[in-house]
Image (cartoon, rainbow, N blue to C red):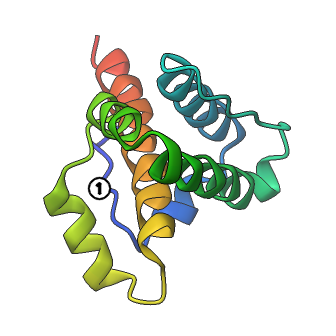
Amino acid sequence: MDLPQISNQNVSGFFTQAEIVQETAEQIMKDFGMFGVEITFSGNTDQAYFELHHQLIEQISVLIERNYELLLSVLYQVDISDREIDRTTRELPHYSHVEIIAHQVIVRDLKKVLLRRYFKNQH
């Protein structure tokens, strides 16, 4: 198994495998749950990206309005940099700023899942 290369354009290709989708959803729920922000997942892998993206947009919007410092803490935990947000803004110009942040959360947690799986298979 080669180390997967994930970009903003190929994320949906990784959302075709139920186990990866479930693990990514669990990682997102864990990362946000650490800060008392609830994200849920129905288990519907066909709509997983849209379901998670929609919830993240809602939660991030609330955090921007009510507790920006908490949002920064969550983004730090997820490990999203300003550079990644800027790159995604250029690559996905049709996304709003909140949609970009939500997308980056999904991408970053997907990367975590795939890297764990890659290194687990190396042993």
Q: How many marks?
A: 1
- The residue positioned 43% from the left and 47% from the top of the image is 105
Q: Amino acid at mark 1?
A: Gln
Q: Report the residue at 66% width, 45% height from top.
A: 17
Left or right of 21 in this view: 101: left
Q: Work out which residue is located at the far top of the displayed protein and give it.
A: 123
Task: Please name the residue shown 56% across and 35% down the image.
Answer: 24
Quarter holding residue 19? top right
> Quadrant location of the N terminus?
top left
In the rendered view, would you say 95 is above or below 86?
Answer: below
The x, y position of residue 102, in whole percent, is: 49, 56
Q: Quadrant of the C terminus?
A: top left
Left or right: 105 with respect to 69? right
The residue singled out by tag 1 in the image is 5
The part of the image, by quadrant, that contains residue 82 is bottom left
Residue 14 place in picture, x, y as percent: 54, 54
Q: Up-down: is 122 above or below 87? A: above
Per the image, label 1 sits on a secondary structure element best described as loop
Q: Give residue 40's position: percent from left, percent from top.
A: 75, 33
**Residue furthest to the front:** 66
Residue 76: image quadrant is top left
- Rate crowding at label 1 as few (under 14), some (14 to 19) or many (20 or more) other CA atoms within 10 Å: few
Going by the image, does 18 lie left or right of 30?
Answer: right
Q: Residue furthest bottom?
A: 94
With 32 as the anchor, is 39 left or right in this view? right
Q: Residue at x 43, y 38 (%)?
A: 109
Does residue 45 sit above or below 20 in this rendering?
below
